[in-house]
Amino acid sequence: MKEVIQNEIYGEIVYEESFWTGKKTLTISGVAANKISKKEFRLPDGRTATVQGNFLQGACLLVESESIRLTPKIKWYEIALAIIPFLLIMVWGNVVALCEIVPVVGGAIGGGLSALFSVAGLVLIKRVKPIWLKALIALAVTGVTFGICCGIGYAILSSL
């Protein structure tokens, strides 16, 4: 994930973070900062900068006593939208009356799958800006999660 920030003092700051490995790169005013450690960089002027946080939590660049926000903090409604698939499967999978209508796999399998889709949904939700699009993504992820858990539930019932 790549973020470009304009700063009055440092100019254009480009922050990149790999979703899979967590590897961070930092470019300030077109010059790549040298990596000292996993979170520390040597700036072109010789000072040391530290990146705190990550893309999901919100990242900050600390240069001496100055803090520069690189990515926004996660908002409460993003978390609420992201956990909807998990809550739906956990509730639906544990209520017998609902499973008689549409069987879904619950327990460890349903919880694991829905948690995986919830995290994927959170990553997608963090990437977009408009709130209506965040809600649409949450709805789509919830539908996909429910469909997959429902398919597994039907498969388990048909094998019995």
Image (cartoon, helix red, strand yellow):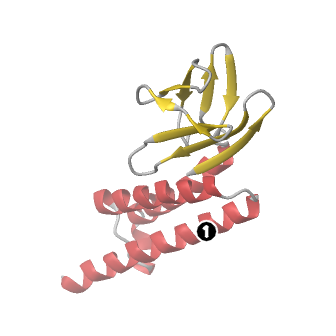
Q: Is residue 69 above or below residue 1?
A: above
In this view, the residue in front, 128 or 158, is 128
Residue marked by disc 1: 139
Point out the image quarter for the C terminus.
bottom left
Splitting the image into 4 quarters, where does residue 100 fall?
bottom left
Q: Residue furthest left?
A: 160
The total number of labels drawn is: 1
Q: Is residue 99 above or below residue 33?
A: below
Q: Residues within 10 Å of mark 1 (few under 14, many from 20)?
A: some
Residue under the image location 29 percent in, 57 percent down: 108
Q: Position of residue 38 (x, y in %)?
A: 41, 30
Left of 68 or right of it: where is 113? left
Q: Is residue 70 above or below residue 65?
A: below
Q: Residue furthest right?
A: 8
Q: Residue furthest top?
A: 65
Left of 73 or right of it: where is 148? left
Secondary-structure class at tag 1: helix
Residue under the image location 64 percent in, 50 percent down: 78
In this view, the residue in front, 134 or 100, is 134
Q: Position of residue 145 (x, y in %)?
A: 46, 69
Amino acid type of the residue that numbered disc 1 sits on in the rendered structure:
Leu
Q: Residue furthest bottom?
A: 158
Q: Position of residue 159 (x, y in %)?
A: 19, 84
Residue under the image location 68 percent in, 46 percent down: 4
Q: Is residue 18 above or below residue 72?
A: below
Left of 15 or right of it: where is 7? right
Residue under the image location 53 percent in, 73 percent down: 143
Q: Position of residue 101 (x, y in %)?
A: 45, 80
